[in-house]
Each structure stands twice: as structure tokens, then as C-alpha cells.
């Protein structure tokens, strides 16, 4: 029997692809009667992991040929037959009994089979161990509780658990009276057979490190068109392989909405803005915290009153305007006070040497990114925003043939508004304070007016310190006007959404064709909040290949269920502990839509290399986001997100770049005690966990919300609290 069994094992190993060498795998087979059917469980222990594969068979099925559903055990029929022949000699079928045995595999055939089993399995914690050299059966657990004890599984606990090593010695097998527990046990550890690499802390000089907007690297690039302040990421040999430290005395941020007005000084220890902008009331130092009164250069009565002034000119409260972009945002007070009106603004500003304006915005719980109007397109799709805003943002709108205003036109929705305050608006009153001549300011305003006219914009109103233009609803009249204004011409590019490292163009982004002058190009959007779950025009028009109305609606229902499940496994979700949330692979934005009930905002990221570009439809739903290549760093400061959701990200990137650096980047942007939720197939999650275990994260792999037979699992991780030592910051 033994020699025959070995020969079959070798045949299976050859078919699958043997790894070679001699190792011992412990094989357990459980049999249980349930409703006149037998439920078999094959458990294999290999590489320090216990794998349990349950399946059903009728009572009268011969034990040497019982069927395994392809959905549960996805081998070809040939491989299934061979595996069953291997297993059948050790199966002793009798009602309500459990038989345990060990088999010696030589050569070991788990190069494929183990990987596939991992995707369709329950997972239990098991300490790494080398199997003994003795061939034969190892001692079976004498009870169900001992079985779980030996694999480090505390049935009654969801806490983090310690594990005991599985004995390597063997003894005679003993009968077991208790049947196997076939219920799913969640939140349990999976330990790799190899020690995780322990990542050290970077020097404190890197505490504020922004890899792709490093001022020192930027100085090497051309200053023309602000190119030196654009994204310039480190080369592979320059990548840091250490953990970015938090400053000493770092504290958890205030909860929203208190965080809008207060942040801890220890978290961003920079007083420069409070001194430089003291007369403008941007920010004040009050003991151990910063206070944000809501002031600004162009809103001396406060941002709230400034927004009220805008509301008198265009409707801000009826749900028509939902998404906005603030160019050169300061500390994002404009965006902060729009939130109370259910308008979400994407605020951006360049990386400053010391002032860290975007950092303050994110610390306040307000959406923001590091970015600049330079030579490249902003990383947003065409027709994304209902409103764009510039309050003394110092962008030369009329320069380079109006290229920057042309870029605003690209990202503005048909019928969207552009609001300008500050120079040169109302120059007749302010020209002395701006320390510029009347002639200079008049020429600038005339130039802006001319570019806007050539873009076919309509000037809605100029009142007080504000001037408002509106983009046309379609290009029918604009095309006719080209007979008068020959520049800029209509772009001939077939992808207006392309925005990742894409140079700006001096041409008007074409709008979707319409049949009448009253029709809105690209389709009419519902008012907020109905917009969040209405079918986006990009889908209903069929402009996104492979994306249908049915798929969109199914995705909405899917994420409602998933977020309901998250509420049970992440208690802080409904306790207001999270504010800044990122979805690293947003797809349709279903996660963000399902999170609307919580006091959070979501940065929806669509990988720049995705086969299907869905960021445009996410904006049509009333959410914000950006393109990103996760082989590079994100455009934000360290410790700016409370919760990161990573669904399927690493299956996309594991063959494109070293996922270790993606995880180190996630650690950089995640706050101490922040949470990450990974969704992926088990083999990917095990690889992720083996890395994050060395990053001072606590994590556990859990079953999919639909149950243990789904190949997709959840890895829930939490970054531990730690800070760097007090040293002089760079």
C-alpha cells in the first residue's frame, strides 16, 4: 500500500510541478453525517498553515470516487482523480467518526495544489514549525478543543491570540469522539513559515517626507511653468525602506466637526503661517493647538460669510452644485465651510518649504492634495467639477495663451462655474494695497476676459470682490464662434480624461455631441443627494466599454452589504474615529456611496493603468478622487488618512512593482492607530501580512462577508502608535 501510494503521489507531483525535497505534510480527513449525506473535510498542514476544505457527498458514493464541486476545488478532472486516489487509502468511512493520519510526500506536490487550496479554505493560526523526520501518523488531538489549541485558535475569542508550536514528535493515532467544528472562525492569525522582515524607523529628518514632491529633488528641475514643483518621484535605488516616524507627542486628531477649527500643534509643529498670515486670520496658535478662525486674504469676514456671498450670485444650497475644486487653496477654509452645504471641494496647493498648507487642510479633516498648475494636466477627468475657485491663488491665468484657464475648462462640467476673487478683480479699489500699477492690473483683467470669451464662457456677474463665469452647456454655438475666435481650436485628442503625466494642451477639450442647443453635453445630472445612486450619464450613454446599468446597480447593492459588514468588524467606523478615508481602487465609487451615512469623506483613487477608467463616473455621482499609479508615492503628507480601503489593489500591482514599497507608502500616509482593510485572494493577503507584520502593524485574515467558501478574503490591519525621537527636523 505504501509504495503504491508513493508512486501515485509522485505522479501527482509531476503533473502539478514538484518543488522537490522531502517534507512531511499532515493530512487530516474528517467525516460527518448530516441529513443522510456525508460531509468530508480534507485538512492539509503545510508550510505552517492549516487548510480545511469541506465538501459534500451522498452516503452511497464509493469513497474512492466521491465528487468535489469544481467551484470549491478547482482542479481539472485528471488532477481531481489523482488526488482522490492519493487520499482514498487513508479514508476510513464510518458514521460520526473522525480519522486522522499522516502521509509522507516525496517529492512534495504542493507547488500548485497548496496555492489553489489556500483560495478556498478556512484559515487558522499555526506557529511556524519544521515537520519531524519520522514517517508515520502523528498523534491526533483527543478533543475538539485540543485540535484548536494545537493550531492556535481560540474558538470563543475575537482578540489577537498567541499560538503554540505544533509538536514535531509523533505517537500512535488515537480515536476522536468529537466531530470537527465546521463553523467559520473569524479574525484569526495566519503566520508565515518565515520571519517577517523588521522595518526600522527612518531618521526624524524624514518625518515630513513627501517622496514625489521633495523640495530638494525639485530644485534639480526646470523652474519654467513651475515644473520643479510638479511630481518628480525617486528612482528605484532612492526609495526608502524604512518607516516614516511621527513627531514626538503626536496625538490623535480632533473628531469632526471640531477638527475643522482645531488641530494639535505637536502633529504639525510649524508656526510660520500663524506669523506670516497673522493679519489675515488664517491660523492662530492657542497653547498646545492651532485654531482656524476661517479667515483668508479675500474673506476678512470669514470663509463662512464669503461662501454666503457666493451663494447670492449662484445657487449653492439646492443640490445643483456638488463637486468643486479650489486652486491654490491655502488651509482650505473655503472647502471646509462648503461641507456644511453638502458641497465637497478638492483643494490643492504646492508643497511649501515650511508652510504645509495642504497638510493643515487634511489635519482639519478637509479634502486636499499636493498639486500645482504647472505644465501637466491636473490628475482629474474631464467634466469633473460643478464649480472651480481661485481666491488670490497667484496663478497667471492669461499666460501661455491662456493654458491654465483652458485646463480649468477641461475639468469643469458643462454649465459649471468659475469664481475668481483677488487680483485683478476690483483693481480700482485695491491696486495700491496690491503694490501694482493700474495699467498692469487692467491689462491682466482684460487678458482673462479675452481668454474666457475665446473659451465660449459667459460672464455671469461681477459684484464686490467676486467675478463669476459659466462654461457653456454644449459646444454648438462655440463651434460657430470659432469663425470669429480662431484660437484656441478644439482639441482632436480622443481621450479628454487622460490626465496622468499628460501635458496640458492649448486647445479646448471637446464636449460630447448634442442634437440641440438646449441639451446638456454628456447628460444631465441629478441634484445631490439623489446623484449618489442615480445612474451616471457616462454609464447610461454606454461611453464606458463593458460597464452597464445593471452592473452599476449590482455594485451599489454589493457595497451596501460590504459596508454593513465592515461596521461589525471595525467598531470605530460608527464611533466617529475616522474622518479622512481613501479607497485605493475605487471602481464605481460604491464604497464611498455606502459610507455616506458616516461623518467621513472618501478620496476615490482609480489606478492610472486600469483597463477601464471609471473616475469620470465617480465624479458624476458627486464624489471626488484622483488618478494614481501605486508604484509611486501619493501626493500627500505623512499621516493624513485615518482609514485606507484596498480592494484588489495588490492583484493589480504585484507583477508591476515590489509591493513592499506600496505597503511602506500606505504606512507613510496612514495615521498612528489608523486602519487598513485589504480585500484580495488569500495567497495575496498572506504575502501582504508577511510584510506588514514587520511594519508594527497588527493584522488578521477574516472570511469574506458571504462566508468561508468565497476565494476573496479580508485582511484587517491596524497601525500601532509609535513616534520618533526628538531630533532637529530638516
Image (cartoon, rainbow, N blue to C red):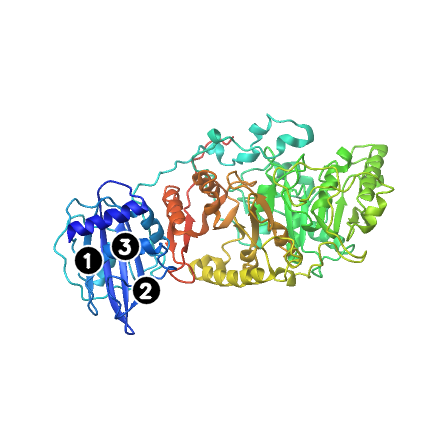
Dot 3 falls on a residue whose secondary structure is helix
Mark 2 to mark 3: distance in Å?
Answer: 25 Å
Q: Nearer the viewer, residue 501 or 511?
A: 511
Q: Pointer 3: what residue?
A: 83
Residue matched to label 1: 89
Q: Does label 2 or label 3 sit earlier along the sequence?
A: 3
- Answer yes or no: is residue 461 visible: no
Select label 2 or label 1 by which is in front: 1
Spatial separation of the CA atoms under disc 2 and disc 1: 27 Å
Of 386 and 552, nearer the camera is 552
Mark 3 is surrounded, within 10 Å at the Cα level, by few (under 14), some (14 to 19) or many (20 or more) other residues, namely some
- Name the side, left or right, on which 84 lies relative to 250: left
Q: Secondary structure at mark 2?
A: loop
Q: Is residue 518 left or right of residue 346?
A: right
Q: Is residue 21 above or below residue 625?
A: above
Which of pointers 1 and 3 lies earlier in the amino acid sequence? 3
The Cα atoms of the two marked residues, 1 and 3, are separated by: 11 Å
What residue sits right under mark 2 in the picture?
A: 183
- At horizontal 30% and vertical 53% (from top left) the residue drawn is 125
Instruction: Give the mark, 2 or 1, whose residue is nearer the N terminus.
Output: 1
Q: Is residue 523 visible?
A: yes
Residue 547: x %, y % from top left:
59, 56
Q: Position of residue 24 (x, y in %)?
A: 21, 47
| Closer mark to the observer between disc 2 and disc 3 | 3
Q: Position of residue 265 (x, y in %)?
A: 53, 42
Residue at coordinates 77% horizontally, 58% vertically from top-left?
Answer: 519
Find the residue positioned furthest to the bottom. 35
Amino acid at each position: 500500500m505504501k509504495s503504491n501510494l508513493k508512486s501515485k503521489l509522485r505522479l501527482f507531483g509531476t503533473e502539478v510541478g514538484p518543488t522537490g525535497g522531502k517534507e512531511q505534510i499532515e493530512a487530516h480527513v474528517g467525516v460527518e453525517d448530516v441529513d443522510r449525506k456525508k460531509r468530508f473535510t480534507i485538512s492539509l498542514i503545510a508550510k505552517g498553515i492549516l487548510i480545511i476544505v469541506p465538501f459534500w457527498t451522498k452516503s452511497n458514493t464509493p469513497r474512492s470516487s466521491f465528487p468535489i464541486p469544481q467551484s470549491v476545488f478547482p482542479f481539472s478532472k485528471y488532477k481531481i482523480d489523482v488526488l482522490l486516489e492519493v487520499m482514498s487509502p487513508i479514508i476510513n468511512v464510518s458514521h460520526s467518526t473522525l480519522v486522522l493520519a499522516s502521509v509522507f510526500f516525496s517529492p512534495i506536490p504542493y507547488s500548485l495544489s497548496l496555492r489553489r487550496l489556500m483560495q478556498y479554505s478556512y484559515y487558522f493560526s499555526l506557529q511556524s514549525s519544521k515537520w519531524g523526520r519520522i514517517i508515520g501518523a502523528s498523534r491526533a488531538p483527543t478533543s475538539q478543543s485540543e485540535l484548536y489549541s494545537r493550531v492556535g485558535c481560540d474558538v470563543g475569542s475575537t482578540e489577537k491570540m498567541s499560538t503554540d508550536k505544533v509538536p514535531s514528535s509523533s505517537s500512535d493515532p488515537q480515536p476522536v469522539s468529537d466531530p470537527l467544528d465546521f463553523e467559520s472562525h473569524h479574525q484569526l492569525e495566519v503566520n508565515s513559515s518565515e520571519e517577517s522582515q523588521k522595518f526600522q524607523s527612518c531618521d526624524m529628518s524624514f518625518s515630513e517626507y513627501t517622496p514625489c514632491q521633495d523640495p530638494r529633488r525639485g530644485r534639480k528641475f526646470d523652474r519654467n511653468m513651475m515644473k520643479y514643483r510638479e511630481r518628480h518621484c525617486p528612482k528605484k535605488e532612492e526609495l526608502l525602506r524604512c518607516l516614516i516616524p511621527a513627531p514626538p507627542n503626536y496625538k490623535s486628531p480632533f473628531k469632526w466637526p471640531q477638527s475643522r477649527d482645531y488641530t494639535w500643534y505637536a502633529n504639525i509643529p510649524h508656526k510660520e503661517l500663524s506669523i506670516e498670515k497673522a493679519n489675515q486670520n488664517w491660523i492662530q496658535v492657542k497653547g498646545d493647538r492651532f485654531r482656524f478662525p476661517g479667515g483668508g486674504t479675500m474673506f476678512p469676514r470669514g470663509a463662512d460669510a464669503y461662501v454666503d456671498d457666493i451663494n447670492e450670485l449662484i445657487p449653492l444650497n439646492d443640490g445643483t452644485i456638488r463637486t468643486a475644486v479650489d486652486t491654490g487653496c491655502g488651509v482650505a477654509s473655503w472647502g471646509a465651510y462648503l461641507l456644511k452645504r453638502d458641497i465637497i471641494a478638492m483643494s490643492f496647493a504646492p508643497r511649501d518649504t515650511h508652510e504645509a498648507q495642504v497638510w493643515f487642510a487634511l489635519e482639519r479633516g478637509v479634502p486636499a492634495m499636493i498639486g500645482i498648475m504647472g505644465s501637466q494636466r491636473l490628475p482629474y477627468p474631464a467634466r469633473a467639477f460643478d464649480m472651480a475657485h481661485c481666491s488670490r491663488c497667484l496663478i497667471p491665468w492669461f499666460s501661455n495663451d491662456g493654458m491654465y484657464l483652458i485646463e480649468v475648462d477641461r475639468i469643469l462640467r458643462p454649465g459649471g462655474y468659475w469664481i475668481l476673487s483677488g487680483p485683478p478683480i476690483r483693481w480700482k479699489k485695491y491696486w495700491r494695497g496690491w503694490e501694482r500699477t493700474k495699467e498692469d492690473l487692467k491689462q491682466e483683467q482684460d487678458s482673462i476676459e479675452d481668454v474666457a470669451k475665446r473659451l465660449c464662457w459667459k460672464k455671469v456677474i461681477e459684484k464686490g470682490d467676486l467675478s463669476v463665469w459659466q462654461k457653456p452647456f454644449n459646444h454648438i454655438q462655440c463651434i460657430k464662434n470659432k469663425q470669429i475666435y480662431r484660437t484656441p481650436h478644439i482639441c482632436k485628442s480622443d481621450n479628454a480624461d487622460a490626465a496622468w503625466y499628460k501635458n496640458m494642451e492649448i486647445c479646448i477639450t471637446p464636449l460630447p455631441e448634442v442634437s440641440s442647443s438646449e441639451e446638456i453635453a454628456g447628460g444631465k445630472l441629478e441634484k445631490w443627494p439623489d446623484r449618489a445612486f442615480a445612474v451616471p450619464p457616462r454609464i447610461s450613454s454606454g461611453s464606458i466599454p463593458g460597464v452597464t446599468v445593471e452592473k452599476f446597480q449590482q455594485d451599489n447593492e454589493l457595497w451596501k452589504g460590504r459596508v454593513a459588514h465592515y461596521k461589525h468588524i471595525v467598531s470605530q467606523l460608527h464611533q466617529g474615529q475616522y474622518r479622512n478615508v481613501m479607497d485605493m481602487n475605487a471602481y464605481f465609487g460604491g464604497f464611498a456611496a455606502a459610507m455616506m451615512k458616516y461623518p467621513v469623506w472618501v478620496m476615490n483613487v482609480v489606478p492610472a493603468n486600469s483597463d477601464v477608467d471609471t473616475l469620470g463616473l465617480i465624479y458624476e455621482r458627486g464624489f471626488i478622487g484622483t488618478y494614481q499609479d501605486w508604484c509611486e508615492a501619493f501626493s500627500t503628507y505623512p499621516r493624513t488618512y485615518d482609514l485606507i480601503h484596498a480592494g484588489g489593489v495588490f492583484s493589480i500591482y504585484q507583477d508591476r512593482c515590489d509591493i513592499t514599497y506600496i505597503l511602506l507608502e500606505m504606512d507613510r500616509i496612514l495615521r498612528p492607530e489608523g486602519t487598513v482593510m485589504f480585500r484580495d485572494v488569500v495567497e495575496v493577503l498572506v504575502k501582504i501580512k508577511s510584510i506588514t507584520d514587520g511594519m508594527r502593524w497588527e493584522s488578521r485574515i477574516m472570511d469574506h462577508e458571504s462566508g468561508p467558501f468565497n476565494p476573496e478574503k479580508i485582511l484587517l490591519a491596524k497601525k500601532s502608535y509609535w513616534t520618533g525621537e526628538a531630533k532637529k527636523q530638516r
